[in-house]
Image: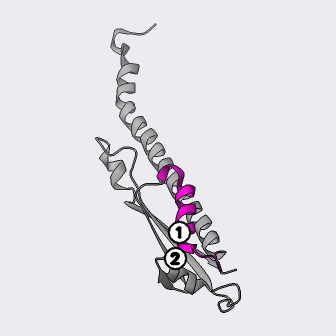
Amino acid sequence: MRGKRQRGVAAVEFSLLLPVLLLILLGIAQFSWLISNFIIVTQAASVGAHQFASERGFSTPYSDTVSIVTNALGPLRTGFSISTSVNGVACTSDSACQAALGTMSNAPAAGSTATVTLGHAFSPLYAGAWGALASIMPKNITSTMTEVIQ
Protein backbone atom coordinates (compact mmCIF):
# COMPACT_ATOMS: atom_id res chain seq x y z
CA MET A 1 0.00 0.00 0.00
CA ARG A 2 1.31 3.43 -0.88
CA GLY A 3 1.70 6.08 1.67
CA LYS A 4 0.25 9.53 1.35
CA ARG A 5 3.64 10.98 0.44
CA GLN A 6 4.13 8.71 -2.59
CA ARG A 7 0.91 9.62 -4.38
CA GLY A 8 1.53 11.15 -7.80
CA VAL A 9 5.27 10.47 -7.81
CA ALA A 10 5.03 8.53 -11.10
CA ALA A 11 3.20 11.44 -12.75
CA VAL A 12 5.85 13.90 -11.58
CA GLU A 13 8.67 11.66 -12.80
CA PHE A 14 6.91 11.23 -16.16
CA SER A 15 6.44 14.98 -16.53
CA LEU A 16 10.14 15.51 -15.86
CA LEU A 17 11.23 12.87 -18.38
CA LEU A 18 8.71 13.70 -21.13
CA PRO A 19 10.61 16.72 -22.59
CA VAL A 20 13.84 14.71 -22.74
CA LEU A 21 12.11 11.76 -24.40
CA LEU A 22 10.41 14.08 -26.91
CA LEU A 23 13.71 15.74 -27.74
CA ILE A 24 15.32 12.36 -28.38
CA LEU A 25 12.37 11.22 -30.51
CA LEU A 26 12.33 14.43 -32.57
CA GLY A 27 16.11 14.25 -32.95
CA ILE A 28 15.84 10.73 -34.35
CA ALA A 29 13.13 11.86 -36.80
CA GLN A 30 15.16 14.92 -37.85
CA PHE A 31 18.34 12.89 -38.43
CA SER A 32 16.37 10.24 -40.34
CA TRP A 33 14.95 12.98 -42.61
CA LEU A 34 18.49 14.26 -43.24
CA ILE A 35 19.81 10.79 -44.10
CA SER A 36 16.83 10.16 -46.40
CA ASN A 37 17.44 13.44 -48.25
CA PHE A 38 21.17 12.69 -48.52
CA ILE A 39 20.51 9.25 -50.01
CA ILE A 40 18.02 10.66 -52.55
CA VAL A 41 20.42 13.44 -53.64
CA THR A 42 23.39 11.05 -53.87
CA GLN A 43 21.39 8.52 -55.88
CA ALA A 44 20.14 11.25 -58.25
CA ALA A 45 23.71 12.51 -58.78
CA SER A 46 24.87 8.95 -59.48
CA VAL A 47 22.09 8.38 -62.02
CA GLY A 48 22.85 11.76 -63.61
CA ALA A 49 26.58 11.04 -63.90
CA HIS A 50 25.92 7.67 -65.48
CA GLN A 51 23.49 9.22 -67.97
CA PHE A 52 25.83 12.12 -68.75
CA ALA A 53 28.82 9.82 -69.33
CA SER A 54 26.86 7.72 -71.82
CA GLU A 55 25.59 10.70 -73.87
CA ARG A 56 28.53 10.82 -76.30
CA GLY A 57 27.19 11.33 -79.81
CA PHE A 58 23.72 12.47 -78.73
CA SER A 59 22.41 15.95 -79.48
CA THR A 60 20.98 16.84 -76.04
CA PRO A 61 23.32 15.53 -73.33
CA TYR A 62 22.75 18.38 -70.86
CA SER A 63 18.94 18.38 -71.20
CA ASP A 64 18.79 14.59 -70.89
CA THR A 65 20.93 14.68 -67.75
CA VAL A 66 18.84 17.42 -66.12
CA SER A 67 15.66 15.52 -66.98
CA ILE A 68 16.84 12.22 -65.50
CA VAL A 69 18.17 13.94 -62.36
CA THR A 70 14.85 15.74 -61.90
CA ASN A 71 12.99 12.43 -62.15
CA ALA A 72 15.43 10.70 -59.78
CA LEU A 73 14.99 13.40 -57.14
CA GLY A 74 11.33 12.46 -56.73
CA PRO A 75 9.84 14.51 -53.88
CA LEU A 76 12.90 16.81 -53.74
CA ARG A 77 12.43 18.16 -57.29
CA THR A 78 12.26 21.79 -56.19
CA GLY A 79 15.17 23.83 -54.89
CA PHE A 80 18.05 21.92 -56.45
CA SER A 81 21.01 23.02 -58.54
CA ILE A 82 22.96 20.96 -61.04
CA SER A 83 26.32 21.50 -62.68
CA THR A 84 28.03 19.30 -65.23
CA SER A 85 31.60 19.15 -66.44
CA VAL A 86 33.75 17.12 -68.79
CA ASN A 87 37.36 16.64 -67.67
CA GLY A 88 36.91 19.46 -65.16
CA VAL A 89 35.61 21.98 -67.74
CA ALA A 90 32.06 23.11 -66.99
CA CYS A 91 29.39 22.83 -69.66
CA THR A 92 25.93 24.32 -69.16
CA SER A 93 24.24 23.83 -72.52
CA ASP A 94 23.56 21.00 -74.91
CA SER A 95 25.93 22.34 -77.57
CA ALA A 96 28.83 22.87 -75.13
CA CYS A 97 28.36 19.44 -73.55
CA GLN A 98 27.99 17.77 -76.95
CA ALA A 99 31.29 19.26 -78.13
CA ALA A 100 33.05 18.29 -74.89
CA LEU A 101 31.75 14.71 -74.86
CA GLY A 102 32.72 14.07 -78.48
CA THR A 103 30.96 12.14 -81.21
CA MET A 104 30.77 8.47 -82.11
CA SER A 105 33.53 8.92 -84.71
CA ASN A 106 35.58 11.41 -82.65
CA ALA A 107 35.90 9.92 -79.17
CA PRO A 108 37.45 11.89 -76.30
CA ALA A 109 40.82 10.86 -74.88
CA ALA A 110 40.89 7.60 -72.97
CA GLY A 111 39.99 8.07 -69.32
CA SER A 112 38.01 11.27 -69.90
CA THR A 113 35.45 11.85 -67.18
CA ALA A 114 31.99 13.33 -66.94
CA THR A 115 31.02 14.87 -63.60
CA VAL A 116 27.63 15.83 -62.21
CA THR A 117 27.37 17.93 -59.04
CA LEU A 118 23.97 18.20 -57.43
CA GLY A 119 23.02 20.55 -54.61
CA HIS A 120 19.79 20.68 -52.66
CA ALA A 121 18.61 23.12 -49.99
CA PHE A 122 17.82 20.99 -46.94
CA SER A 123 14.69 21.97 -45.05
CA PRO A 124 14.45 20.34 -41.61
CA LEU A 125 11.24 18.77 -40.37
CA TYR A 126 11.19 20.77 -37.14
CA ALA A 127 12.36 24.34 -37.14
CA GLY A 128 9.97 25.85 -34.61
CA ALA A 129 10.19 25.65 -30.83
CA TRP A 130 12.71 22.85 -31.08
CA GLY A 131 15.01 25.12 -33.09
CA ALA A 132 18.13 23.60 -31.59
CA LEU A 133 17.44 20.51 -33.67
CA ALA A 134 17.34 22.59 -36.85
CA SER A 135 20.49 24.53 -35.99
CA ILE A 136 22.69 21.42 -35.98
CA MET A 137 21.49 20.31 -39.42
CA PRO A 138 23.24 21.37 -42.65
CA LYS A 139 21.64 24.03 -44.83
CA ASN A 140 22.60 22.32 -48.10
CA ILE A 141 23.22 18.77 -49.26
CA THR A 142 25.76 18.41 -52.07
CA SER A 143 26.82 15.31 -53.95
CA THR A 144 29.35 14.97 -56.77
CA MET A 145 29.61 11.88 -58.95
CA THR A 146 32.12 11.19 -61.72
CA GLU A 147 31.99 8.54 -64.44
CA VAL A 148 34.33 7.64 -67.29
CA ILE A 149 32.89 8.71 -70.66
CA GLN A 150 31.72 5.70 -72.66
Q: Is residue 139 rendered to the left or right of residue 83? A: left
Instruction: Say which quarter of the image contains residue 98.
Output: bottom right
Q: Are marks 2 and 1 in contact (CB under 8 Å)?
A: yes
Residue sitting at 39 percent across and 49 percent down? 124
Q: Earlier in the sequence, mark 2 or mark 1?
A: 1
Residue sitting at 36 percent across and 43 percent down? 126
| Nearest the eye: 116 or 29 | 116
Q: Amino acid at mark 2?
A: Asp
Q: Is residue 71 inside the magenta stretch?
A: yes
Image spot of residue 10 (x, y percent): 41, 20
Image spot of residue 52 (x, y percent): 60, 73
Q: Amino acid at mark 1?
A: Ser
Task: Name, please, the residue furthest toward the left.
Answer: 129
Identify the residue position indicated by label 1 in the image.
63
Residue sitting at 36 percent across and 49 percent down? 133
Image spot of residue 36 (x, y percent): 53, 51
Identify the residue position indicated by label 2 in the image.
94
- Residue range of the region highlighted in magenta in the rendering: 55-76
Q: Is residue 73 inside the magenta stretch?
A: yes
Vertical position of residue 2 compared to residue 60: above or below: above
**Secondary element type, mark 2:** helix
